[in-house]
Image (cartoon, helix red, strand yellow):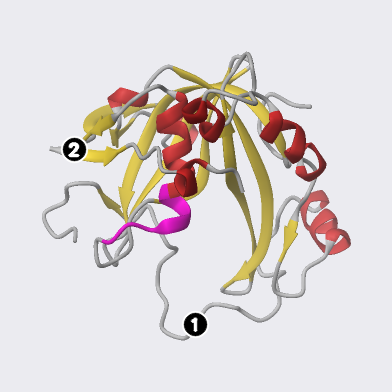
């Protein structure tokens, strides 16, 4: 069974300091394992276990590939498709169970991972996003785009076989952009980080009443009750 089929359609390949990835920017990494999770509502997302300059870490980039009803999520699937094209794949098989050191304190944890995309070098553009959830400030690393290592080619350029590096040049002006939501600003977030990211400092919650879970990561891919 196939987890994802690459698309070479024009609309699907067009682009829209420390070893730990902690700020907006473009990072050259080796993707060790894309980890698939299923939300409580049934949507499927992909997060990346990567190696950046010898530091292995999870990038919870919120690549939501499908919606709760099983339909393709246009935004997340489009960005994930860039990675598939850069990896020179036509099709990505369903995930398999592996163990990664991503539990508490680096403990081993069993996850569902996409083997076809293991050990793939890529450049990831990440934009930090700050918002409020249940009265707490939350930090997200939002994956905006992927580029091929070496020539900085985008998925669109790889498919069209021309203009390698053009999209990369266009995106340089966005590398330091940060998204602030729910009334937050640079000063408030800087103070929160300097204080050690304490809980209860986000003011009123922005989450809808009755919402119990973040958008992904609550169930394993393939769980019996997954949608």
Q: Is residue 197 within the magenta segment? A: no
Q: CA distance from mark 2 to mark 1?
A: 35 Å
Return the residue nearer the eye: 115 or 224. 115
Q: Secondary structure at mark 2?
A: strand
Return the residue nearer the eye: 9 or 188. 9
- Residue that badge 1 annotates: 208
Q: Which residues are magenta?
A: 71-77
Q: Position of residue 149 (x, y in %)?
A: 59, 18
Return the residue nearer the eye: 123 or 38. 123
Q: Residue at x 33, y 42 (%)?
A: 36
- Residue that badge 2 annotates: 2
State left or right for residue 150 relative to residue 66.
Answer: right
Q: Residue at x 70, y 31 (%)?
A: 166
User: Which of the two discs, 2 and 1, sits closer to the camera?
Assistant: 2
Find the residue positioned furthest to the bottom. 209
163 to 218, vertically: above or below: above
16 to 202, vertically: above or below: above
Q: Position of residue 37 (x, y in %)?
A: 32, 48
Q: Residue at x 25, y 67 (%)?
A: 69
Q: Secondary structure at mark 1?
A: loop
Q: Is residue 74 within the magenta segment? A: yes
State left or right for residue 74 relative to residue 18.
Answer: left
Return the residue nearer the eye: 52 or 63. 63
Q: Position of residue 93 (x, y in %)?
A: 22, 32
């Amino acid at each position: 069974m196939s987890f994802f089929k690459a698309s070479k359609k024009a609309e699907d390949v067009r682009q829209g300091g420390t070893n730990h990835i902690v700020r907006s920017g473009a990072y050259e990494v080796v993707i060790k394992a894309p980890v698939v999770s299923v939300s409580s509502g049934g949507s499927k997302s992909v997060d990346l276990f990567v190696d950046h300059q010898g530091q292995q870490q999870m990038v919870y980039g919120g690549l939501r590939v499908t919606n709760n009803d099983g339909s393709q999520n246009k935004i997340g699937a489009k960005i994930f498709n860039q990675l598939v094209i850069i990896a020179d794949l036509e099709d990505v098989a369903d995930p398999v169970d592996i163990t990664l050191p991503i539990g508490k304190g680096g403990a081993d944890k069993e996850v569902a991972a996409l083997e076809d995309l293991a050990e793939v070098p890529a450049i990831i553009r990440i934009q930090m996003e700050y918002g409020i959830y249940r009265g707490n400030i939350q930090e997200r690393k939002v994956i905006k785009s992927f580029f091929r290592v070496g020539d900085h080619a985008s998925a669109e350029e790889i498919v069209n076989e021309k203009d390698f590096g053009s999209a990369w040049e266009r995106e340089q002006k966005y590398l330091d952009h940060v998204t602030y939501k729910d009334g937050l600003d640079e000063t408030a977030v800087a103070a929160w980080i300097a204080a050690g990211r304490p809980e209860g400092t986000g003011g009123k919650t922005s989450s809808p009443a009755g919402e119990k879970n973040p958008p992904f990561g609550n169930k394993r891919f393939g769980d019996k009750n997954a949608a």
